[in-house]
Image (spheres, helix red, strand yellow):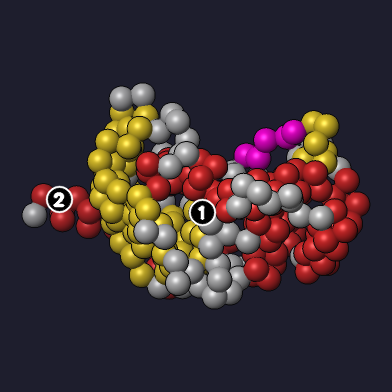
Amino acid sequence: MSELDIRNLHVSVEGREILKGVNLIVRQGEVHALMGPNGTGKSTLAYTLMGHPNYEVTEGEVWFKGKNILELEPDERAHLGLFLAFQYPVAIPGVSVANFLRSAINAKRRAINPEDKGIPVPEFRRMLKETMDLLKMDHTFASRYLNEGFSGGEKKRAEVLQMAVLRPEIAIMDETDSGLDIDALRIVSEGVNTLRGPDLGVLVITHYQRILNYIKPDFVHIMLDGRIVESGGAELALHLEEHGYDWLREKSAEAMNG
């Protein structure tokens, strides 16, 4: 069973420290929710884990499958089994969803075996149709240009489709609920729940409880000021919705002063 092990992670952006010692373990088969107000470092963690060059790691390690992934390029981290669903997916005009997915699969296969000729087209088409049926997606979706003219919900469904096709071991979902209405949120969440299982670990990053009404987490973590200050079960998110963050700020301040 693979696990993503984040140890004392410190990260700066343009000389300003954002993450101030994050410790977290996410295992295959587990769903973790990372919550916290805007600006506390949640998305910084997501981008750092996937190797965004603007985020400077000043201290700490991140271990996955026996490797400190901080030493790897973003594509190497992806090939190893990590996946990031973006808060704001980028449109790629002229590249269909199907062609994008086939290229991604072939890149992953060739990372394992440079002699790999790529997935045969008939096999890919069959797999893609089966996956879209599993996610209850119209097959015409595959012929559209990636994220061009997509609604917010369609962009997030495209991310879930990528996750289903690439089969990562650990998926990081950065504020997937951002910009979605209730119907779109429910549809996207159903897709995630369909993929949920022993082979997939998920880190859901959000500052709203509402997505957790659909994707039930095994663990909830609260981040304030660049640190995880509280962890618990699903009930922690409900407590947070009712009481806000003030009690945690007070608790965190007492711990630092005490």
Q: Observer-nearest residue: 191 or 96? A: 96
**Residue 94 horizontal side relative to residue 257, left or right:** right
Decide: is 57 above or below 49: above
Mark 2 highlights which residue? 256
At label 2, counting other C-alpha atoms closer than 10 Å, the crowd grade (few under 14, some 14-19, many 20 or more) is: few
Determine the main secondary structure of the stretch shown in magenta. loop
Q: Observer-nearest residue: 106 or 226? A: 106
Question: Count the marks: how many?
Answer: 2
**Residue 139 is drawn in which quadrant?**
bottom right
Q: Observer-nearest residue: 152 or 246? A: 152
Residue sitting at the far left: 258
Mark yes or no: residue 175 visible.
Answer: no
- Identified at 49% across, 48% down, the residue is 77
- Identified at 36% across, 62% down, the residue is 25
Q: Which residues are magenta?
A: 88-92
Residue sitting at the far top: 14
Asked if residue 39 lies in the magenta stretch, the reply is no
Mark 1 highlights which residue? 80
- Three-letter amino acid code of the residue under disc 2: Met
Residue at mark 1 to residue at mark 2: CA–CA distance: 37 Å
Q: Between tags 1 and 2, which lies in front?
A: 1
